[in-house]
Image: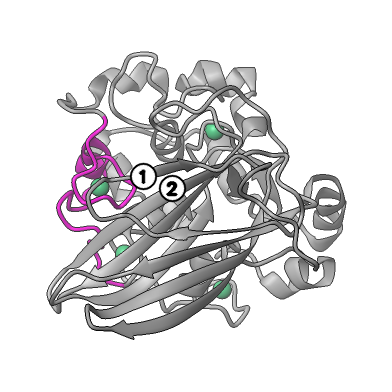
């Protein structure tokens, strides 16, 4: 992480200097003792299971991989799950810091840092260390909501990051650009098979399981029982071709309560994104949908639905806890 940011080519091109305090923040890996305290205080007590049926790659394409994450949670460098109400990849705790709000223009209710509607999200602004004083130097953004390749990075952000807005996996390492960026990996360098924290899990597997790629899991996660997302992919062959049913368990329920869900899925308590990567032998393509549920979901709840990521960029399903979720024995 530090190596990546410390020699950051994007910042060089923008002529922006990372504040020392920010650099230290990114490199702050808490030791086991600290992590034990944090986990006992912040570990979400509940998990749910989602099952997305009928995932059918388009003709001529094959399923390459799947990535599921609760966007309302951020995985800390020590393996803790922190609530993130505006789904931007920065925890509430961090965005509530008044000094950081002033320095970067970020805020817990602004996924886009968009006091000025510049098209560059809080996470990107913060990770690149672009202070409000320097944000006027960003290139103009024509369509601030556009994400042509559906990889989770806006077109305008891809412009300054040097990734390709029409290719969801610029470095072709199997992990979509937006997923890599959010996990603090490098979307322009094939690093999916690497294991920088030497815990036996590749970056790709860390990202899929929502564990921190830069912190050794055995030190933190296993002894304290932090759940890793579990994937169970089942193949279903029919007259229409090969389709898949995907069950994801151990999805943490974040204990945050906000207002009603708007069309972007913001304002919801828990927003789980299911991203399906297909390949045709040349380039990846992404289908995704989003499932929304409330913090009141019972521990061990389970919901089943048909995957529908074909026509819309994101299909938001509001799953009221009382009618859709059923309690299952653990
Ligand atoms: Ca946030
Ligand atoms: Ca994109
Ligand atoms: Ca990639
Ligand atoms: Ca690892």
Examine the structure image and report whether residue 147 is included in the region drawn in magenta.
Answer: yes
In the rendering, at what x and y percent does residue 173 appear?
Answer: 31, 72
Query: In the rendered structure, which segment of residues is drawn in magenta?
Result: 145-173
The numbered disc on residue 93 is none
- The answer to which image quadrant residue 153 occupies is top left
Q: Secondary structure at mark 1?
A: loop
The overriding secondary structure of the stretch rendered in magenta is: loop
- The answer to which image quadrant residue 154 occupies is top left
Examine the structure image and report whether residue 239 is included in the region drawn in magenta.
Answer: no
In the rendering, at what x and y percent does residue 86 appear?
Answer: 52, 31
Q: Nearer the viewer, residue 41 or 238?
A: 238
User: How was this image coloured?
Assistant: one colour
Image-based side of 132 in relation to 239, left or right: right
In the rendering, at what x and y percent does residue 198 appear?
Answer: 60, 78
Confirm or deny contact between disc 1 and disc 2 (CB under 8 A).
yes
The residue drawn where x is 59% and y is 27% is 95
Q: Secondary structure at mark 2?
A: strand
Q: Nearer the viewer, residue 244 or 215?
A: 244
- The answer to which image quadrant residue 323 occupies is top right
Q: Is residue 149 visible?
A: yes
The numbered disc on residue 290 is 2
């Amino acid at each position: 992480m530090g190596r990546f940011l410390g020699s950051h080519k994007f910042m060089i091109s923008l002529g922006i200097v990372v504040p020392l305090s920010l650099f230290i923040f990114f490199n702050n890996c808490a030791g086991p003792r600290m992590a034990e305290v944090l986990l006992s205080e912040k570990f979400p007590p509940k998990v749910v299971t989602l099952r997305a049926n009928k995932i059918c790659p388009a003709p001529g394409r094959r399923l390459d991989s799947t990535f599921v994450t609760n966007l309302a949670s951020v995985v800390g460098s020590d393996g803790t799950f922190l609530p993130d109400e505006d789904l931007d990849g920065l925890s509430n705790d961090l965005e509530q810091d008044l000094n950081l709000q002033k320095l970067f223009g970020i805020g817990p209710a602004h996924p886009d840092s968009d006091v000025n509607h510049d098209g560059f999200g809080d996470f990107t602004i913060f990770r690149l260390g672009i202070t409000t004083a320097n944000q006027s130097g960003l290139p103009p953004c024509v369509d601030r909501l556009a994400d042509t390749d559906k990889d989770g990075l806006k077109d305008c952000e891809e412009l300054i990051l040097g990734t390709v807005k029409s290719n969801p996996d610029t470095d072709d390492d199997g992990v979509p650009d937006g997923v890599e960026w959010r996990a603090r990996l490098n979307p322009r360098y094939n690093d999916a098979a690497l294991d920088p924290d030497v815990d036996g899990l590749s970056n790709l597997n860390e990202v899929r399981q929502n564990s921190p790629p830069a912190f050794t899991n055995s030190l933190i996660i296993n002894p304290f029982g932090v759940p890793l997302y579990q994937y169970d992919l089942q193949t279903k062959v029919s007259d229409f071709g090969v389709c898949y049913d995907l069950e994801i368990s151990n999805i943490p329920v974040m204990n945050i309560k906000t207002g009603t869900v708007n069309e972007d899925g913001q304002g919801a308590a828990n927003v789980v994104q299911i991203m399906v990567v297909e390949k045709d032998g040349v380039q990846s393509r992404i289908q995704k949908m989003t499932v929304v549920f409330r913090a009141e979901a019972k521990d061990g709840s389970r919901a089943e639905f048909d995957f529908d990521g074909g026509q819309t960029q994101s299909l938001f399903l509001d799953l009221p806890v009382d009618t859709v979720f059923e309690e299952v024995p653990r």
